[in-house]
Image: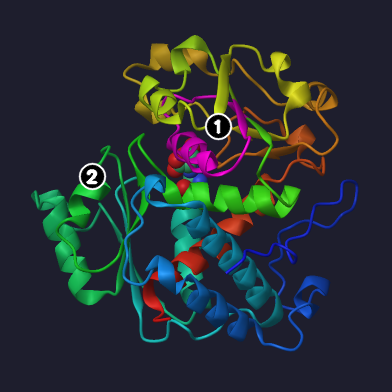
Amino acid sequence: MSFLVSSIKKRKLGSSSSSSSSSSSSSPDAKKTKGSSPVDAVRSTITNAAPRKWHGTSVLGVDQFTKTHLEDVFALAENMKQLVAVQGGCDLLKGKVLGNVFYENSTRTRASFETAAYRLGGNVLNISTTGTSVKKGETLQDTLRCIECYTDVLVLRHPENGSVVRVDEYLKKPLLNAGDGTREHPTQALLDGFTIMSEHGFIDGLTVTMLGDLKHGRTVHSLSKLLCNFSNVTLRFVSPDALQMPAKILTALQGKVTFSQHADINEVIGETDVLYVTRVQKERFATLEEYDAVQGTFVVDRTLMQKAKDNMIVMHPLPRVGEILEEVDNDPRCVYFSQMANGMYTRMALLALALVKP
Ligand code: ASP
Ligand code: ASP
């Protein structure tokens, strides 16, 4: 399949149109599917993706993907966006149950997986650490093996690095990593890639600047590796010294992408096409003093936005805790809310790829 992004529009600056659409009424975009139904388009993309063997396969980290896998996900996420715009959803996952298991806080990931399953006609079993036998000392693998008996696909977020990969060894059903410690957040990286593609129309050749807590932020670890699948991407890593991108990630990027590290955003803001901001991850600091020393050291405000390109986009996995001021929210370059909406379309795509037989 050649990946066509024809229906992914390049964002028009200054217009009020955004890439997000939660309306269930027919939109101008949706009319483009005339001739074949949105469900036909979804099925056709799933069929085209069959050679990549998505069905029944876990998503554990971005290293498992080639560029073609990413194209499958972006194309299907776009189909899902159309589907939701035209008819709200469908019954592709009728009779299927998602086990949504969260050992760490979440708003967006959990809610978007849950609504993704509902919009495809499936059901959801939500499990969090409170109220389970985890409190009685049950191992992670035993808890997951139990939930696997009642469900068809599992989503797991857990604070320990590598825990999701380890537990997958015990499971027969597909497991989707919703964040394991500071290591990976692959479904976030996929929705981030989809957002960049939707907003810019392409990824090759872009300069992506990651700003903030690059040490603990699992989303930037996953996204920087995912971007290695594209040509001529330049990465600029901007952070306080104490929060630099881990050496392990820099080694993984070596030879695959051009990158440099900076302490001051002003050095690179003018050349940036995508500004990806992250919060300082308070919960991952050993002491409050260490956190206080770095919190609030970078901020995206109107003054910074004035120095940026007209078509730069600002992204953030959210939640934000002061690093992007609300005063810039209405700047059309700030796309973090449509990025958040893209989470549901991308997770609809991932659930369908894992569960629908091509
Ligand atoms: N975006 C984060 C997540 O993956 C944080 C949040 O949900 O509040 O869930
Ligand atoms: N929501 C993202 C995550 O779960 C980012 C964050 O929490 O800061 O990793």
Identify residue type, mark 1: Thr
Instruction: Give the x, y percent position of residue 311.
Output: 82, 39
x%, y% of residue 26?
Answer: 78, 79
- The residue tagged 1 is 278
Identify the mark nearer the N-term, 2 or 1: 2
**Badge 2: residue crowd in 10 Å (few <14, some 14–19, many ≥20):** some
Q: Is 181 above or below relative to 306?
A: below
The relative height of residue 34 versus residue 183 in the rendered view (above or below) is: below
- The residue positioned 55% from the left and 18% from the top of the image is 239
Q: Nearer the viewer, residue 142 or 222?
A: 222
Residue 300 x, y percent position in the rendering: 70, 26
Look at the numbered disc 2 and give the secondary structure of its residue. Answer: helix
Q: Which residue is mark 2?
A: 163
Q: Is mark 1 within 8 Å of ligand 2?
A: yes
Query: Where is residue 341 drawn, in percent x and y?
Result: 62, 58
- Near-viewer residue (244 or 134): 244
| Residue 41 higher or lower than 279, as above or below | below
The residue type indicated by label 2 comes to Ser
Question: In what quadrant of the picture does the C terminus appear?
Answer: bottom left
For image coordinates 90% across by 47% down, the residue present is: 14
Name the element at disc 1: loop
Q: State which region is magenta.
A: 209-235
Q: How is the image coloured?
A: rainbow
Report whether residue 10 is seen.
yes
Left or right, 134 with reference to 27: left
In the rendering, which numbered label is found on residue 118?
Answer: none
Residue 225 is a magenta residue: yes
Displayed quadrant of residue 210? top right
Question: What distance separates the C-alpha of mark 2 from that of mark 1?
Answer: 23 Å
Q: Is residue 106 visible?
A: no
